[in-house]
C-alpha cells in the first residue's frame, strides 16, 4: 500500500503525497516547535518541509523509512531557520497604566511561543527505545526554553536522540555527520542542560495528573484569585521560588515576593480580568480578557501555568496575538 502511494506520488499525484505525509504532520509540527521554540516558525518550517519533500520525492529510494526521511528534511529546515538572521527581538513594556517593577533578570528566549494542544491530543508517536524524556515533558515550556539556548547542531542531536529515540546511526545520516560527532554533540548538549537545571530540581513536586481533581482544584483557585484580584489568595498558591516570564518582553521575575509585586502592580492599576481556560504545551492555560466600562472584555494575553504539587511554580504570559491559535476570541461579551 505504502509502496503504491510512493509510486503514485513520485509520478506527480498530489493526493497520494497527502495520504503519505498526513500521518506524520502532527509529530513533525511538534518536532519543528521543539527545534525553534516558536509556533509560527514551526508552521513555516513544516510547510517548507512538505514542499521540499514533494520536490525531492523522486530521489527517495527507501533506504530509510519515510518517517526518518521526513525527519531529516524537517530537522535541516529548522537548522536553516535557526541559522538565519532576523529572529524576533524582545519588546518594550507595553501595559498602559501599569508601572513595571524591576525585573529579576532579562530573558534570552524572547521568541518563545506557546503550542496549542488538547488533553486528548497525541503530542507525538511512541518514541524510540533510546529516548530519555516523556513526550509531555519534552514539549513543556521549561524544556523548550532550555533547549533553545543550545547551539543548533547540539539541539538537533538532543531532540532526535533523547526525545525521539532515533539511533545514533540514523541521526548521523540525517545530519550528514559521523556517529562519533553525533555522540560528542549529544554529550555536550546533555552537560549544558544539566548545568542550567536548578540544583534543587530533585525536590520539586510533580504536577498533578492532567484532568485530575487536584489539577482542577488548583486551577479553580487560581481563576478565583485572579478574577477577583485577590492578591493574598493568589500568593498563597505560589511556590517560594515561583518564576514568571512574559515573552516577547524579556522581563523575568523570580521568587514569591517579587512575583507578588508584579501582580500587585496589575491589580492596583484597577485592571480586572476574565479568564477562559484552554491548554498549552500540556499545561493549564487561560486567555486573559481585560474588563472595561462598556461591559466587553478585550483579550490582552494568554497565561500558561506550570504546576508543582498543590502550588504554581511558573507563570508565563504571552501576548494576545496567540489567542486565535487556541480558538479563543479577541473579546468577550458582557457577563451581565
Image: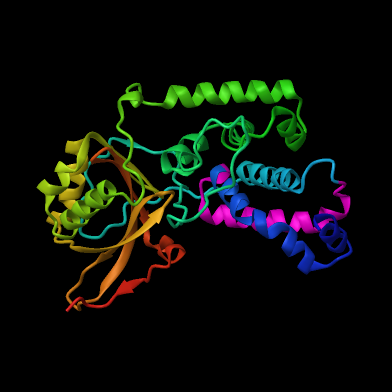
**Left or right: where 51 falls relative to 153:** right
What kind of secondary structure does the magenta stretch mostly adopt?
A: helix
**Left or right: where 270 falls relative to 309:** left
Look at the picture and state if 197 lies above or below 51: above
Residue 47 part of the magenta segment: yes
Q: Position of residue 132 (x, y in %)?
A: 54, 30
The quadrant in which residue 151 appears is: top right
Q: Quadrant of the N terminus?
A: bottom right
Look at the picture and state if 301 lies above or below 134: below
Foreground: 78 or 207?
Answer: 207
Q: Quadrant of the C terminus?
A: bottom left
Residues in magenta, as a range: 35-61
Q: Residue at x 37, y 62 (%)?
A: 320
**Left or right: where 74 falls relative to 302:** right
- The answer, for residue 86, to whether it is visible in the render is no
Q: Position of residue 28 (x, y in %)?
A: 62, 50
Amino acid at each position: 500500500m505504502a509502496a503504491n502511494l510512493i509510486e503514485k506520488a513520485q509520478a506527480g499525484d498530489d493526493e497520494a503525497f497527502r495520504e503519505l505525509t498526513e500521518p506524520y504532520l502532527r509529530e513533525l509540527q511538534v518536532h519543528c516547535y521543539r527545534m525553534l521554540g516558536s509556533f509560527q516558525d514551526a508552521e513555516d518550517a513544516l510547510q517548507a518541509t512538505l514542499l521540499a519533500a514533494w520536490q525531492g520525492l523522486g530521489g527517495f529510494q527507501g533506504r530509510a523509512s519515510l518517517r526518518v526521511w521526513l525527519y531529516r528534511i524537517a530537522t535541516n529546515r529548522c537548522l536553516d531557520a535557526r541559522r538565519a538572521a532576523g529572529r524576533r527581538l524582545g519588546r518594550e513594556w507595553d501595559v498602559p497604566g501599569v508601572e513595571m517593577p524591576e525585573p529579576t533578570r532579562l530573558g534570552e528566549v524572547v521568541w518563545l511561543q506557546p503550542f496549542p494542544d488538547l488533553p486528548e491530543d497525541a503530542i507525538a508517536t511512541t518514541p524510540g527505545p533510546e529516548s530519555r524524556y516523556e513526550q509531555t515533558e519534552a514539549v513543556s515550556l521549561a524544556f523548550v526554553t532550555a533547549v533553545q539556548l543550545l547551539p543548533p547542531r547540539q539541539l538537533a542531536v538532543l531532540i532526535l536522540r533523547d526525545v525521539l529515540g532515533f539511533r545514533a546511526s540514523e541521526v548521523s545520516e540525517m545530519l550528514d555527520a559521523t556517529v562519533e560527532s553525533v555522540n560528542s554533540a549529544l554529550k555536550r548538549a546533555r552537560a549544558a542542560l544539566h548545568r542550567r537545571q536548578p540544583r534543587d530540581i530533585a525536590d520539586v513536586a510533580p504536577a498533578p495528573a492532567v484532568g485530575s481533581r487536584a489539577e482542577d482544584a488548583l486551577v479553580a483557585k487560581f481563576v478565583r484569585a485572579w478574577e477577583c484580584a485577590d492578591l493574598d489568595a493568589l500568593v498563597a498558591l505560589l511556590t517560594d521560588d515561583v518564576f514568571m516570564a512574559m515573552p516577547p518582553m524579556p522581563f523575568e521575575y523570580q521568587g514569591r515576593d517579587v512575583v507578588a509585586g508584579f501582580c500587585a502592580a496589575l491589580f492596583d492599576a484597577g485592571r480586572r480580568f476574565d479568564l477562559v481556560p484552554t491548554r498549552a504545551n500540556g499545561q493549564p492555560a487561560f486567555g486573559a480578557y481585560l474588563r472595561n466600562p462598556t461591559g466587553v472584555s478585550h483579550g490582552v494575553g494568554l497565561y500558561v501555568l506550570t504546576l508543582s504539587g498543590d502550588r504554581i511554580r511558573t507563570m508565563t504570559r504571552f501576548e494576545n496575538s496567540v489567542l486565535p491559535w487556541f480558538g479563543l476570541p479577541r473579546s468577550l461579551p458582557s457577563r451581565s
